[in-house]
Image (cartoon, grey):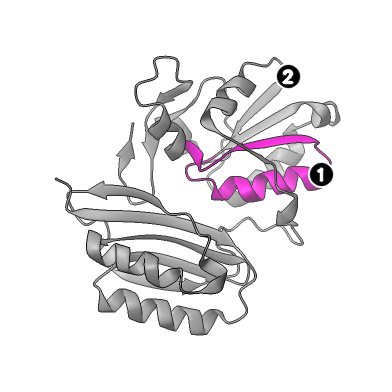
C-alpha cells in the first residue's frame, strides 16, 4: 500500500494579502510535516504537497476554511516514498509564469472532458497544440499534437503568434498540459488574439490518463512527466 498522499491544486483568484497567507499556510504545513511547494501571487495559488493521508486530509479541510478556496479541486495520487524533501511557500508575480501583460483569464477557452477531447481531435479542422516543453513532449503526447519546441512556458506566446495564421482563427484549437493550469493562460491568450474556437483538456493529461487506463482507443502515446519526477502512464 502507498504510504504517502499527494495533492496538487490551483486557483486563479485575486489575492490581496499574499504575505499573510504565506505565513499561515507555511505554519500549518510545518505543524503536520507536510512537504512540497506552494506558489502564491496576486492572481491566485498553485501547489503540490505530500504527507501521510491524515495530514493531507487535515490540510484540505483547513484550506477550505478560507472562503475564497472553498471550491478548490484537489488532484490526488499516492506514492510509496515521500516525493518532496522540503516545504516551501513562495510569493511570485505569477503562479505559472507566462510573461503576458494584461491577460484576461476570464476569457479562457472552453473545458473539454476526456471523451469530448477525443471527439474534437477526430475533426479535420482541429489544431492540437502541446503547451508543455520539449522534454515533456518527447516522453509522451497526444497523437497528431504539434510540438512548439519550447524550453520554457514563457516562450509559448511568441510561438503561437508566429505559427498560427489569420486563417486559423475560425478553426478548432485544442490545447493541453499536464494538470490544466498552463492551458488556462495559453487559451486566454489565444482568445485575446482573436481566435474563436479555443478549447483545453479539463484537468489536463493526468485526468485523461485516469479516465482512459483501459481504453485501447486512447489517443495518448507514451508517458507523462510530472514535476516531482514521477512518471504516469
Question: Horizontal and vertical percent for residue 222?
Answer: 39, 25
Q: Is residue 191 magenta?
A: yes
| Residue that extends furthest to the left in the rendered view of this protein | 1
Mark closer to the chain start, 1 or 2? 2
Range shown magenta: 177-205
Residue at (62%, 38%) from the top-left corner? 200
Q: Counting other residues with Cα less than 10 Å from the Cα at mark 1, is it few (<14), some (14-19), or many (20 or more)?
A: few
Question: Horizontal and vertical percent for residue 91?
Answer: 51, 74
Residue at (48%, 67%) from the top-left corner? 39
Question: Horizontal and vertical percent for residue 170?
Answer: 82, 28
Q: Which residue is mark 2?
A: 125
Secondary structure under the numbered disc 2 in the rendered image: loop
Secondary structure under the numbered disc 1 in the rendered image: loop
- On the picture, is 111 further left or further right than 230? right
- On the picture, is 161 further left or further right than 112? right
Question: Horizontal and vertical percent for residue 16?
Answer: 62, 79
Q: Which mark is residue 193?
A: 1
Residue at (24%, 72%) from the top-left corner? 33
Q: Nearer the viewer, mark 1 or mark 2?
A: 2
Amino acid at each position: 500500500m502507498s504510504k504517502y498522499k499527494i495533492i496538487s491544486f490551483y486557483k486563479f483568484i485575486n489575492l490581496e494579502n499574499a504575505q499573510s497567507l504565506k505565513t499561515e499556510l507555511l505554519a500549518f504545513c510545518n505543524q503536520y510535516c507536510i512537504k512540497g511547494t506552494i506558489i502564491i501571487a496576486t492572481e491566485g495559488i498553485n501547489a503540490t504537497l505530500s504527507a501521510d493521508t491524515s495530514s493531507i486530509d487535515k490540510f484540505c479541510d483547513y484550506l477550505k476554511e478560507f472562503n475564497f478556496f472553498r471550491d478548490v479541486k484537489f488532484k490526488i495520487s499516492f506514492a510509496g516514498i515521500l516525493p518532496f524533501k522540503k516545504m516551501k511557500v513562495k510569493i511570485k508575480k505569477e503562479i505559472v509564469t507566462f510573461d503576458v501583460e494584461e491577460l484576461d483569464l476570464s476569457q479562457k477557452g472552453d473545458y473539454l472532458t476526456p471523451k469530448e477531447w477525443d471527439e474534437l481531435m477526430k475533426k479535420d479542422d482541429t489544431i492540437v497544440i502541446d503547451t508543455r516543453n520539449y522534454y515533456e513532449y518527447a516522453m509522451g503526447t497526444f497523437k497528431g499534437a504539434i510540438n512548439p519546441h519550447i524550453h520554457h512556458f514563457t516562450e509559448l506566446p511568441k510561438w503561437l503568434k508566429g505559427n498560427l495564421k489569420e486563417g486559423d482563427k475560425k478553426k478548432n484549437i485544442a490545447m493541453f498540459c499536464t494538470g490544466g493550469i498552463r492551458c488556462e493562460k495559453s487559451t486566454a491568450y489565444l482568445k485575446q488574439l482573436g481566435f474563436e474556437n479555443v478549447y483545453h483538456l479539463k484537468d489536463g493529461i493526468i485526468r485523461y490518463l485516469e479516465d482512459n487506463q483501459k481504453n485501447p482507443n486512447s489517443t495518448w502515446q507514451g508517458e507523462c512527466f510530472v514535476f516531482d519526477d514521477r512518471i504516469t502512464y
